[in-house]
Amino acid sequence: MTRLFVGNLLYEVSEPDLEELFSQVGKVVEVRVIRFKDTGKSRGFAFVEMKDESQAKKAIETFDGKDFKGRKMVVSKARPRR
């Protein structure tokens, strides 16, 4: 499985929105919109886990810089946690 960073999202974008979008290019294992702990509001980025490397590469090629709900998404391979 390959984890992707998805940034520059509208605060209203939800997990189901991203799952629907990314399933167009492959099997989505998990979607997690990152939220502020105190308010629960989105921080404007998410992580999408794709089934394999080839599907993740296709997602990056397809969606990086693409307009989604009025904003250009940033999609890249997620860096490992520190």
Image (cartoon, rainbow, N blue to C red):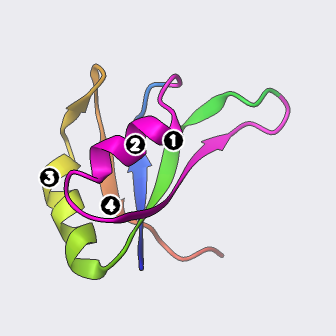
Q: Position of residue 59 (x, y in %)?
A: 22, 59
Please tell me which of labels 4 and 2 falls first in the chain: 2
Marks 4 and 3 sit apart, C-alpha to C-alpha, by 11 Å
Instruction: Kindly state the secondary structure of the residue where label 1 is placed.
Output: helix
Q: Position of residue 45 (x, y in %)?
A: 50, 43
Residue at which label 2 appears: 18
- The reply to whether callout 4 and callout 3 are in contact (CB within 8 Å) is no
- Between 79 and 67, which is closer to the camera in this rendering? 67
Location of the C terminus (image quadrant): bottom right
Marks 4 and 2 sit apart, C-alpha to C-alpha, by 14 Å
Marks 1 and 4 sit apart, C-alpha to C-alpha, by 17 Å
Q: What amino acid is labelled 1 in the image?
A: Glu
- The reply to whether callout 1 and callout 2 are in contact (CB within 8 Å) is yes
- Between 8 and 33, which is closer to the camera in this rendering? 33
Residue at (25% x, 63% y) in the render: 26
Q: What amino acid is labelled 3 in the image?
A: Thr
Q: What amino acid is labelled 2 in the image?
A: Leu
Location of the N terminus (image quadrant): bottom left
